[in-house]
Amino acid sequence: MEDKKFDLNSVIGFLLIGLILFWMVYMNQDEAEEGNLNEATKTEQVAPEEADSLTSNEAVASQPTSQDAQVSDSIASILAQQKLGSFALSEMLAKEQDQDYTYIENEFLKLKVSHYGGQIVDAKLKQHENYLGEPIYIAKEGNSEFNIELKTRDGRTLQTKDLYFVPELKQEGDNQVLTMRLKADQDKYLEYRYLIKPNDHMLDFGMRSQGLSSILSGDTEALLTWQIKSLRHAKSISYENQHAEIIFQYDGGKDDYTNQRELTEETGDKVDWVAYRQHFFSAILLTDSPFKNGKFISENLVQDKQVDTVFTKKYTSEIALQLKGGEFAEQMNLYYGPTDIKILSTYERDLDKVVPLGWGIFGWINKYMLIPFFGFLLSFIPSYGLAIIVMTITVRILLSPVTYKSYLSQAKMKVLRPEIAQINEKHKDNAMKKQQETMKLYSKTGVSPLSGCIPALLQIPIFYALFRFFPSAFDLRQKGFLWADDLSSYDVIFEWDAYIPLISWAYGNHVSLFPILASIAIFGYMQMTTGQNMQQMQQPGMPNMKVIMYIMPFGMLIFFNNYASGLSLYYFISNLITIGIMLVIKNVIIKEDKILQKIEENKKKPKKKKGKFARKMQEIMEQAEEQKKLREKDPKKK
């Protein structure tokens, strides 16, 4: 029925336009004939001295008449009515304007708002630059879109991005207020209201309508689509892309994110906010009353690092807006600014979740320990590189007791190595007996093989928290140290332009020095720890530890070549300090002859009563040994 109605309206419209054009031609012919008659009369009667004024009269007579203008306006009105229905006034008002944009700004932001769609098409950060020294744009015209789908009672589906909004800019105290109205009539409109405050990255953004309940279809929801193609801001587009994703909060405080696949879609109900993180910069849409639901789509635009060098991700949000009595009534906010936890935390809207600090205990360590401590160091240390070194030294000193426990266990195992070797040789054909005798030796001497593993496991939360800290530390961005000009990106000591297959894909087109130093330090550390117990740790069926000792530093060299140089600096200093601490422990604190003496004393002591778990394990092993003996006596017995 809607198609038939639309076709009938179109036919009527074209007939009206044809009648008007016929009437214009007819009227123009009559006017021309009358003008020619009057001209002939004037020619016969004009005096020579009046000849000069004739030219000016002819010029006036040749101009379009007001009647022609009215007819032209009528045609435009009919065409607009055919195209937009109740919102035809929008197109008529657009023709009266000579500008398509209005600008609002403060000390931090300069926003370009298009009159078509009433939407922010440019969001420029005035105090930040990209790796080329160019202004940072979180949104750019042609790459961003904010649209609401309007369904009307006459069967049309209109997109606000294509419709003209009437702007009104005024000052309210220190604040700039821009009102954008999409008019169906003088008292029927959809209104966006942007309020920008001094020294703030957050805007108030209101959306309301008046009188549209009689025009819209009567649906209780309208679809809002918000889309941004994220621009590249850093030297390493692949590294930046790894930390670019959509994060959203929903259902009373839960948060979720899109992963790093080529195309990812996530959904949530009762959505409080959605953030488009572009690594160190973000665009965030917030609402006072949760959106009913939302669908969030992230598309990876970097398929080839040699070709796709402008954009990282394409972000799209499809959000259901609830109409109240057939009208829009939304109080929202828009944030355009740094992904800096210090700034985001001031808004008390859980926006610190946008910063990727790690989950669980890792995020807790970063948020409440490492970030405050690093901020404290920066308050009196002028160099960011030196602040990283001081923080690394502090962390390693605090973890030195754990390092001591780990090395002490390794030293005890080293002293027991000859006896373990004898057990292995004696029971080389009986793995069960070998295990039993080894456990008895550990029990008799008071040595536990797990005592070296547990301290190492206790360090993992700190190490992983630091691994998440450096890529998210906004303070490091464009801060140099030694040969590195930006601690948030890779350092360069040599680079080339040619693309080398595999090498350029895995390693890049440059050589970074900090990852090389860190890899050498890690290799030295592994030589001191893994290397001295290599033979003991090498068991049948177990991975070759010597191979692993070489693979790990090499893997880090490749992996960290495109990572933040601040992270590589941390690993380099951390492993140097760890090596130093272990040398002190080995040569000053722990003496192998004293460890051996202590072990011999433990052997002479009466056996301690075994714990319940130890007794159970011994029983299981003894039963297994008995079953093995029975099978050896009677091979046919199962």
Image (tube, grey):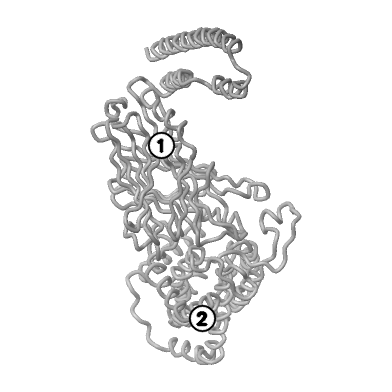
| Residue drawn where x is 38% and y is 82% of the image | 607
Instruction: Name the quadrant of the N terminus.
Output: top left
Q: Is residue 14 above or below residue 324?
A: above
- Residue mark closest to the camera, 1 vs 2: 1
What amino acid type is highlighted by mark number 2? Tyr
The quarter of the picture where residue 542 lies is: bottom right
Indicate whether 303 appears above or below 31. Answer: below
Q: Quadrant of residue 155?
A: top left
Residue 245 seen from this side: yes
Q: Residues within 10 Å of mark 2 (few under 14, many from 20)?
A: many
Task: Read off the residue under disc 1.
Answer: 165
Q: Can residue 409 be seen in this view?
A: no
> Which residue is most to the left?
325
- Residue 551, percent across and down? 64, 65
Mark positioned earlier in the residue sequence (1 or 2): 1
Numbered disc 2: secondary structure = helix
In terms of depth relative to the viewer, which is nearer, 609 or 76? 76
Q: How far apart are marks 1 and 2 (CA)?
A: 71 Å
- Name which residue type carries label 1: Phe
Discs 1, 2 touching: Cβ within 8 Å = no
Query: Could you tell me which residue is drawn at 51 percent across and 56 percent down?
Result: 243
Q: In this view, does 293 lie to the left or right of 438?
A: left
Query: Which percent across, then down, holds residue 112?
Result: 47, 47
Disc number placed over residue 407 in the picture, else none: 2
Query: Can you give x and y, in whole percent of width and height, for residue 484 in the image?
Result: 62, 71
- Numbered tag placed on residue 381 in the rendering: none
Residue 323 versus residue 98: which sits nearer the camera?
A: 98
Residue 364, position in %: x, y?
37, 66
Q: In the structure shown, which secondary structural element does the residue marked by tag 1 occupy?
A: loop
Question: In terms of depth relative to the viewer, which is nearer, 559 or 344?
Answer: 344
Query: Where 403 falls versus 136 (above or below)?
Result: below
